[in-house]
Every structure is written in C-alpha cells, then in structure tokens.
Image (cartoon, coloured by chain):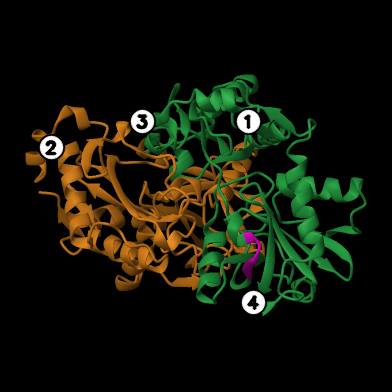
Chain colours: A green, B orange
Amino acid sequence: MSASSTYAAAADPAFAHGAAWVDGEVVPAREARIPILDTGFVRSDLTYDVVSVWRGAFFRLDDHLARFERNWRRLRLRPPLAPGRQRELLFELVRRSGLEDAYVAMIVTRGVPAPGERDPRRFDNRFYAYAVPYVWIQRPDQQAEGTHLVVARDTVRIPPASVDPTVKNFHWGDLVRGLFEAYDRGGALGVLTDGAGNVTEGPGFNVFALVDGVLRTPAEGVFDGMTRRTLIELVREERIAPLEVGELPVAELGRAQEILLSSTAGGIMPVTTLDGAPVGDGRPGALTRRLHARYWEAHGEARFATPVS
Amino acid sequence: MSASSTYAAAADPAFAHGAAWVDGEVVPAREARIPILDTGFVRSDLTYDVVSVWRGAFFRLDDHLARFERNWRRLRLRPPLAPGRQRELLFELVRRSGLEDAYVAMIVTRGVPAPGERDPRRFDNRFYAYAVPYVWIQRPDQQAEGTHLVVARDTVRIPPASVDPTVKNFHWGDLVRGLFEAYDRGGALGVLTDGAGNVTEGPGFNVFALVDGVLRTPAEGVFDGMTRRTLIELVREERIAPLEVGELPVAELGRAQEILLSSTAGGIMPVTTLDGAPVGDGRPGALTRRLHARYWEAHGEARFATPVS
C-alpha cells in the first residue's frame, strides 16, 4: 500500500474524474466552467502550468510554482489568491479527487472586463485550477513500440518575438496544425521548426536526439519543460551522456541514433520512426530506455517528491 | 421610432447585458460559462467571428457567416449546429437581449475530450454564441479627438506560417503584448509589424494610411476585417481616393497625412498621434471624416443591413 492511500481511500466518488477550483468552490472537473467572457478564453490572455502527481506525491511542485509565478508576473497578472494559497488549493484538489496519479493544472487569466471596459490593466484577474487523471501523450502500453514523429513542413513554431514560449500559454494553433499535418502524413505526433531549419517543440513536449554519441536538445524557441529540465539535470549530474543544449538542426535530427520526447504528460517517450523512416534500428534505444527508467525512479526521491498527504 | 422597436420593447430585462447560447440554452451573457476542459480554452483550438447589429439590423450578416464557415472548415471543425440554425440563433440572441446596437460573437471550439482521449479528430466540437452591448475600441465621444497609436518595437505579429491570420482566432498574446508596450510609451493602442518593417494589424483592428494622396492598407499578414473590406469596396466603387492594398512599410506610415483604424468594434477611428508625434495637423483628416460618415451611412443600405425583426 502506498503512502497516499489515506487520501485516496477517503475520496469522494463524485470527483473520480477530477476536481476543479472555480470562483471559490471545488467542483467535479468535468462540470467546472469558466465565464465565456473571460479574456483568458476570448483573448487567450493567461498563463498556466501543469504539475504531475505520481503515486501520491507531487513531482517538483515548488519548481512548478516558481516558474508559474515568474510567468504570471511577466504578463503583469495579479492572481486573486496568494502563491501560498494557490499551493494549498492544489493539495486540496488532489485530495478531493483521490487521484494517486494526476495532472494538476493552474491558470491565471486576465479575467472578465466590466461592461464597457477595454483596458486590460483594469480587469480583475482570475485563478483556476484542476486535478484530473494523469494524461499520457502516448499510453505506457504503447511506449515499448515507440511513437511516430513527423517534422511539420507547412507550419513553423510561433516565434519568441511574437509570443514568449517560456511563458506557458495556450497559443496552440501552430502545434495543432502541425499535429494534423502529422496525421495526414501517417505520423502520430508532429514537431515544428523555427522556420530556419531548427527543431523547436511539439504539442506539450520537448525533443531530445542522440547524434554521434551526444544527447542534444534545442535551447531556444521552446518551453523550459520540467521533464526536459529534469533530464538535463540528471544527465549532467550523473554524467549519463555528453549533453548539448543548443541548436538542433532538422538535418541532425534526421540522422539521430535515438530520439525521445519529454513531457509532464507522459514522461519520456521513445520515437521509433521519423517522417516514416526508422530511427536507429526502429526500436527504443538503450539511452532512451535508461533515461526513461531514471526519470521515473526520480519520482521517489525526496528532493523531487512532495507527498499529497 | 426605429424599425427594431418591437423586439427592443419586448426584451427581457434579465438579458440587458446580453444573451448567450451555451449547450442548447439561452442564458444572460454575463452568467454564460463554458467547460474549463474545452480545448477551445486550454488549447485556444477554435475559430470565431463577430458581426455587429446597428439600429436593429445586422451589418453584412451573410458575409460574416460565409467567412465563419470558410474558417471552421479550414480548421476541420464540425459545428454541432448547421449554418442555417446558427444564423437563426444569432437572431434569437439579439431579440432576447433587446439590444439595438450589439456585438454578436459566434465560436466553434474543438470541444472537450472524452476521458483519456488525445486525438482532436475525435472530439465533439462545440458551438457558442453571444450578443452583448456594442463594443467601442474607442468611445464615440473620444473619436473627435482621435486615438494615439504606437508601433510596437518589442513584439512582432504571429506570422502566417505559424497561425493563419485570415482564420479569426484568439491568439492575442502578441497583440496584448503590443498593447502593454503602447501603454508604457504613452499610447492608447498598439500596432504590430511583421518583423520585416511592414505594418500588420492591432488588437481587433486593421490600419489604413493616406500617403501622398493614396489610401494604403496592408494586404498580407492581417485579418480580412469586415470593416476593412467595406472600406475597400466603398472607396473603389465610389472612387473616393486612389487605393493600394499591398505592403505598408512603417516608414510610409510615419509620413502619412492621415491614419485610420477599422474595426467591427468601433467602425472608423482616426489616429491623431503616431509614436507621440502628430499625424498631419494632429486632428482627424478630411478623408477619415468622409469615410467615417460613409461607413455609418452604409449601415442603412439594404445590401448590407438585415433587420433583426
């Protein structure tokens, strides 16, 4: 029995699909609603973050909260709840849901303008949060086979000069367009370039490639994903492989021996075909399997894990 | 008494701030809510359109509906209501609100994924709509003075290669960033460039400039706004001025004799300062005043106006 069984056993079945915080109330996630006039919706004027809960413990909770705070400050948002209270609420949502493996989102939006008001500096900002069952970009039972990645040709990533990719946002129009292109070309996931021949990121994931014995991941034009950050730290600390955080040209990705995707929604996912051709021998590689194991093992370490109860 | 007084007089006061359609029900707009898990919110995966009602008549309703349909088809959305039913609903919302001057939005979102589902091709798409009191980017009583425009230096418009600007979307992160830059620099509104020295558009408006006797407006990287389209048509049909729809370099904007903004939310707005310096003699110019009058006059013409009742 895991340490978390107390809250899981006590959970309310009404919250089995998750729990959300909206306007001061905890409600079942699938019933939670936000105002249609919130500029978080009608302008996508917001930032968010997502932290996972695994076997009853948050993974790098305070790193997520620090990143979230940096980001809402960057957008000059003023959440109606102080950071400490936001943190408490995340615990409350997970406890109420009873979920031992969860995907926990927190959002600050610009809010609903008063009638006739147009100046976003005068809106009352809003805080929302929800905990839902853990999300897998690729299901674990499919990860042994690996996923099929396509490099989009029709769409480039929104550039940092337009929308800062390090401030987590819901501007996914380019990423969704790349996903549809991937489907059309027989893939399962799409990754976008920067329009100058370099790999950036895909919908909800970062990319790593093992090229000539060096593990490479893009430095610019991407979100500082927490799984990416964890991999970079573990690889460096434990000298698992030479690591280069810099440009990753598509041509280099194309000759990689291994490719893996990192995401809070799924962890480490091996890529076994790129644009329809096998990556390496077409099976998840040794380094990818090692990093997968190491990443999940890290979830039990006290420096990363904060038990829900 | 206007032709619309029948529905206005019969309106329900509960809907004085507007009426919305959500999940098969008409509700007061400020109480209308959408699911927090709708990917229209958490991925901004949607398209929308906005049509105005002026003195009890829709302005270019079928042009708006045609553009909207083109756009949801482009995103491979399948609204749960047929176009004819969507059209009826817009009438119903305006009648219920009793608003004679209204801003009427229609939205199709990708919808809420079933638990565990990740493939957006399998989501049930959603249709929302609302009618609220007419929105002014600049209030009419301020339009005699004109507005203060700033050309953003820190932010460029999301490029068409990332998100198609002709498919109306809520990816406003760049536009809001430009607006904050405008505030910081003493302006009231910001316009973005394409990063190559050309003017694109601002939050909810297109830009026109009178330069050496030629009225110019950008052709690329902008939304095909209905007020913009109406101006282009009227100027051409009635030979009001030489017109050029093409590139509009920032340098040309800087030496314009007149600058005006066009928007469904406010019509024609004169710009009297650019980056803090007067445009022309610092008052709304003769062509701008003429286009303003002509634009509002067109609202009474049968080819453009569809009475609500």
User: Left or right: B61 with respect to B263?
Assistant: left
Return the x and y of residue B294 as percentages of the image width and height: 29, 57
The residue that disc 1 covers is A1
How many angstroms separate mark 4 from mark 1 (CA)? 44 Å
How many angstroms separate mark 3 from mark 2 (CA)? 19 Å
> In terms of sequence position, does the residue under pointer 4 or pointer 3 come before the other?
3
Label 3 neighbour load within 10 Å: few <14, some 14-19, many 20+: few
Closer to us: A202 or B267 = A202
The residue that disc 2 covers is B8
Closer to us: B202 or B43 = B43
Q: Do labels 3 and 2 share a chain?
A: no
Q: What residue type is labelled 4?
A: Asp
The residue that disc 3 covers is A115
Return the x and y of residue A270 as percentages of the image width and height: 70, 62
Residue B47 forms part of the magenta stretch = no
Report in which chain the residue with disc 2 lies: B
How many angstroms separate mark 3 from mark 1 (CA)? 54 Å
> In terms of sequence position, does the residue under pointer 3 or pointer 1 come before the other?
1
Magenta-drawn segment: A143-149
Question: In the picture, which quadrant includes the C terminus of chain A?
Answer: top right
Asked if the residues shown at circle 4 and circle 3 are in contact, with their CB atoms under 8 angstroms apart, the answer is no
Report in which chain the residue with disc 4 lies: A
Label disc, if present, on residue A275 of the rendered structure: 4
Q: Do labels 4 and 3 share a chain?
A: yes
Q: What residue type is labelled 3?
A: Pro
> From this viewpoint, is residue A117 visible?
yes
> From this viewpoint, is residue B1 visible?
no
Label 4 neighbour load within 10 Å: few <14, some 14-19, many 20+: some
